[in-house]
Amino acid sequence: MPKTPPGARRSVGWMGLARGHRAKPTEWLVEKGIFLLSFTAIVMIFLIFLFVGREAWPILTGRMDSSLVRELQDIIPVEDLEKTPPERLRQYLGLTREQFQSMDRETLRDLMQLRIESREQMPDDKDALLNTLQWRYVLGPHQWTGYDRPVYIWQPVSAIHKYNIVPLIVGSLKATFVALIFAVPLGVAAAIYVSQLAPPRLREWLKPAIELLAGIPSVVLGFFALIVLASVLQAVLGYPSRLNAFLAGIALGLAVIPVVFSIAEDALTSVPRSYSEAALALGSTRWQAAWQIVLPAALPGVFAAVVLGFGRAIGETMIVLMASGNASILSWSLFDSVRTITATIAAELAETVVGGHHYRMLFMLGVLLFAVTFLSNLAGDFFIHRLKARLEGRR
């Protein structure tokens, strides 16, 4: 066999170069540019995960304390500034060594005076000694002072900081559940009609028209739900809360329908035409062929559409921020106002102190969203492979 000349390619290149031909410099630059862009995108995503995880790490490991024990320490009068050892003063003010060294005496006096005022305003409450960032308070109920039973409360800006995330999780799931119940049947039905039943000329404009809904900004859908849809649904159904989980779910469903439709339609279209043609030849109607033959064959793709629709709904921010009512109420009624995880992060992050326990808790909620999305996609991939194996007769 003739040897390949030195410097020649040994395989067909990215631009379809024949074996043994040299790559042009411009083609080499394009190939390396594409690789660099792809690698940069992966690195950026990894750095985002790393940053969010780093900010939430003190909460995840239980190393942060939200109790007011430090405020209950003996007050050091402002007049004793010069008499107090520097290390004792630094610990009293809760400063790092770098922060303490960068402050002048006047700033330290102001901080000491602020501590005295904070101590005078601090509530005389036994709950002030609790570290509400512990997982038993974050996930479990607690009977706070003034309550007659254990409750789940998200109240991060109160005198006693309460960080129970159960109302936020339940609110997110309620809105997502309504969105999927509304969007999945409509999206899958539209996909079956467009791919199997619609005339070709109708299909040419109907599919782009439905997919065009994905280009509507979520803030526009949220505004539509807040101004128009909320009043219409309240007038029809008569529920007391104008903004609630049901309204947020319907608005979310409008954003999920294009996702479910697009992926389900592609899955149904990819089923070989011979399947439906054989069913029609045996005497079935077009609807029977689509429902009993094509849909079961495309079931893994349809399930993938549902999983991606769930991820789209659980991660949406603007719609639920504007249409859910933003009340962290733990209720199983769909007609009560709710507060979702994404809306909580969007509404509160800009008002927190960087590095504070409220700030860290919001990043912990971001980690929770990452985990839910990852696990849902992982479970979806697992079930999709099982469905494919069952349809192919391997199980």
Image (cartoon, rainbow, N blue to C red):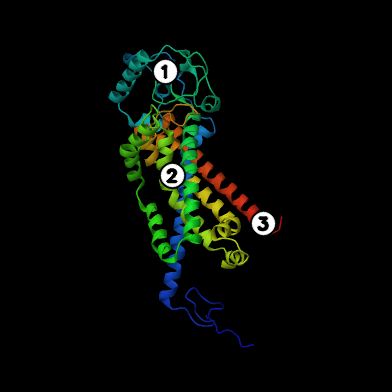
- Considering every residue shown, the one lying at the far bottom of the view is 2
In the rendered image, residue 354, in percent from the top left (x then y), is placed at 38, 34
In the rendered image, residue 179, in percent from the top left (x then y), is placed at 46, 42
Query: Element at badge 3?
Result: helix
- Give above or below for 89 relative to 41: above
Answer few, some or many: residues within 10 Å of disc 1's Cα (few below 14, many 20 plus, some between 14 and 19): some
Q: Quadrant of the C terminus?
A: bottom right
- Mark 1 or 3, nearer chain start: 1
Q: Is residue 364 visible?
A: no
In the rendered image, residue 139, in percent from the top left (x then y), is placed at 54, 28
Residue at 36% x, 53% y is 215
Q: CA distance from mark 2 to mark 1?
A: 48 Å
Q: CA distance from mark 3 to mark 2?
A: 31 Å
- Give above or below for 245 relative to 252: above
**In the picture provided, is 84 more to the left or to the right than 294?**
left
In the rendered image, residue 374, in percent from the top left (x then y), is placed at 54, 46
- Give above or below for 240 relative to 77: below
Residue at 49% x, 42% y is 181
Query: Element at badge 1?
Result: helix
Labelled disc at residue 71: 1
**In the picture provided, is 36 more to the left or to the right than 216?**
right
267 or 49: nearer the viewer: 267
- Mark 2 or 1, nearer chain start: 1
Labelled disc at residue 354: none
321 or 354: nearer the viewer: 321
Q: Is residue 57 visible?
A: yes
Q: Which residue is mark 2?
A: 253
Amino acid type assigned to the residue bearing label 1 in the image: Glu
Amino acid type assigned to the residue bearing label 3 in the image: Ala
